[in-house]
């Protein structure tokens, strides 16, 4: 049987170790097994450690993405509400400018008919996150289309207003008195004095006596005196067929033939003539046809 000798020499002595072939093989195998086991355990530990690190990193990123998406959704919700306000103002301005309103189906751009491209979404995110991202992308696209539509709409309104500024300036478009309670409205009503049903040609606004009355548009005073049921009253001619009438005043501050500007005080409210309580009776006529004043309350004088 072959033997192997391992010898260690020094100045003072010599050490020898004798190993048989079987012992060498056994020792070598033991070392290989030990190294393999150690390598396996180390690699397993390292892989678990790296996996936990990666998992913690993913959780942190997921929380950041989720928080960012929640914040974006909240901001989109606020912007969506502002878009609704802008759309309402768009309709009011178009009515004021004598332009047709934008069809509701056109205003609902971005709803339906749009699909996100799955290839645009990262493939290393959870399905729930991808769904949120897809929904967010659709909301952003809808908002973008609505903003572009409103920009186009305002461009056309600006052009129309610029071309028709003289005509628009003659439209009675401000509320003649600030505040107050809207009482008897335009249309048929039971007369509060004789209980007979009659057509009421204007809008009654209940305010205390002495409340300033503002000219709703520039014009010329056609009447400014006391007359029967109207009591102290004023009639303005604004041009382009528009006239306004203010009745039951306590004081008249203009005279016949006087030129007044939009927002100028023309009188004070009262309870004169055929009236049961202090209020302003306000009428708008267009080429002699009575109009509902509520359709012309575009804004209030500050």
Image (cartoon, grey):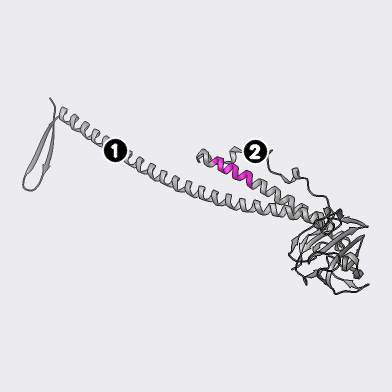
- Point 75% across, 69% down: residue: 208
Mark 2 crowd level (few <14, some 14–19, many ≥20, 10 Å Cα): few
Q: Is the C-beta separation of discs 2 and 1 under 8 Å?
A: no
The residue that disc 2 covers is 115
The residue that disc 1 covers is 41
User: Is residue 236 in view from this perspective?
Assistant: no
- Point 51% across, 47% down: residue: 66
Magenta residues, as a range?
Answer: 130-139
Residue 101 in the image: above or below residue 210: above
Q: Earlier in the sequence, mark 2 or mark 1?
A: 1
Foreground pick, 143 / 221: 221
Mark 1 crowd level (few <14, some 14–19, many ≥20, 10 Å Cα): few
The circle drawn on residue 153 is none
Among the 4 quarters of the image, the one containing residue 251: bottom right
Residue 126 in the image: above or below residue 291: above
- Point 35% across, 40% down: residue: 48
Residue 210: give x, y in percent of width and height.
78, 72
Name the magenta segment's main secondary structure. Answer: helix
């Amino acid at each position: 049987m072959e033997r192997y000798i391992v010898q260690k020499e020094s100045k003072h002595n010599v050490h020898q170790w004798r190993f048989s072939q079987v012992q060498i093989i056994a020792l070598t195998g033991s070392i290989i097994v030990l190294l393999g086991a150690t390598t396996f355990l180390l690699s397993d530990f390292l892989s678990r450690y790296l996996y936990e690190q990666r998992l913690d990193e993913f959780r942190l990123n997921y929380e950041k993405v989720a928080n960012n998406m929640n914040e974006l959704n909240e901001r989109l919700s606020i912007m969506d509400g502002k878009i609704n306000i802008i759309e309402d103002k768009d309709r009011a301005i178009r009515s004021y400018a004598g332009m047709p309103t934008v069809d509701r189906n056109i205003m609902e751009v971005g709803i339906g008919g749009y699909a996100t491209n799955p290839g645009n979404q990262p493939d290393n995110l959870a399905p729930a996150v991808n769904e949120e991202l897809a929904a967010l992308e659709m909301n952003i696209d809808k908002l973008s289309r609505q903003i572009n539509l409103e920009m186009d709409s305002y461009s056309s309104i600006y052009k129309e207003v610029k071309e028709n500024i003289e005509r628009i300036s003659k439209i009675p478009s401000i509320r003649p008195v600030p505040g107050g309670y809207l009482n008897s409205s335009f249309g048929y009503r039971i007369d509060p004095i004789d209980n007979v049903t009659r057509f009421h040609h204007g809008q009654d606004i209940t305010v205390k006596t002495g409340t300033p009355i503002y000219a709703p548009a520039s014009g010329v005073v056609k009447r400014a005196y006391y007359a029967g049921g109207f009591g102290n009253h004023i009639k303005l001619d604004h041009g382009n067929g528009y006239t306004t009438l203010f009745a039951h005043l306590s004081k008249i501050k203009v005279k016949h033939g006087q030129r007044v500007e939009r927002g100028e005080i023309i009188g004070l409210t009262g309870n004169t003539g055929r009236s049961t309580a202090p209020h302003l009776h306000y009428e708008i006529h267009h080429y002699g046809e009575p109009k509902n004043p509520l359709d012309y309350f575009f804004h209030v004088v500050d």
